[in-house]
Image (spheres, rainbow, N blue to C red):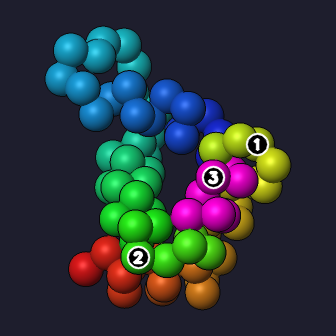
Amino acid sequence: MLRLWFAVGGDFSFPHTTGPKPRGVEVTNWYARRIGLASKKDADIRRIFTSVQQLVAPPSTLFKPAMVAKVLWLSR
């Protein structure tokens, strides 16, 4: 399910996107933006996010408590 959110969630960042919006997509998009900001400061976050995007690592990797804490801290 997380792969679906990341795959279609980005589309809903654009106001002209139509169709049913998956539940939780706003939170996923918010967190993805935070990952993008944090990845500019931390090579490990960038590497992990790239691995998820390229389907090498499961999306759940991005939601481990240590990862979330690091992302939130670096993206503030």
Q: Which residues are magenta?
A: 46-52
Distance between the alpha carbons at the discs numbered 3 and 1: 9 Å
**Magenta residue check for 48:** yes
Can the viewer see residue 49? Answer: yes
Find disc 1 in the rendering and name its residue.
Answer: 55
Quadrant where the C terminus is found in the figure: bottom left
Horizontal and vertical percent position of residue 10:
40, 34
Label 2, residues with CA under 10 Å away: few <14, some 14-19, many ≥20? few
Residue depicted at x 34% and y 65%: 37
Can the viewer see residue 1? Answer: no
Q: Residue furthest right?
A: 56
Quadrant where the N terminus is found in the figure: top right
Quarter of the image for residue 12 reads top left
Horizontal and vertical percent position of residue 49:
60, 58
Secondary element at image label 1: loop
Label 3, residues with CA under 10 Å away: few <14, some 14-19, many ≥20? some
Distance between the alpha carbons at the discs numbered 2 and 3: 14 Å
Residue type at numbered disc 3: Thr
In the displayed structure, 28 sits above or below 38; it is above
Residue situated in front as seen by the camera: 23 or 56: 56
Q: Residue 2: which numbered mark, if any?
A: none
**Magenta residue check for 73:** no
In the displayed structure, 66 sits above or below 52; it is below
Secondary element at image label 3: helix
Find disc 2 in the rendering and name its residue.
Answer: 41
Horizontal and vertical percent position of residue 17:
29, 16
Horizontal and vertical percent position of residue 75:
32, 75
Find disc 3 in the rendering and name its residue.
Answer: 50
Question: Sequence order check: which comes first, mark 3 or mark 1?
Answer: 3
In the displayed structure, 38 sits above or below 16; it is below
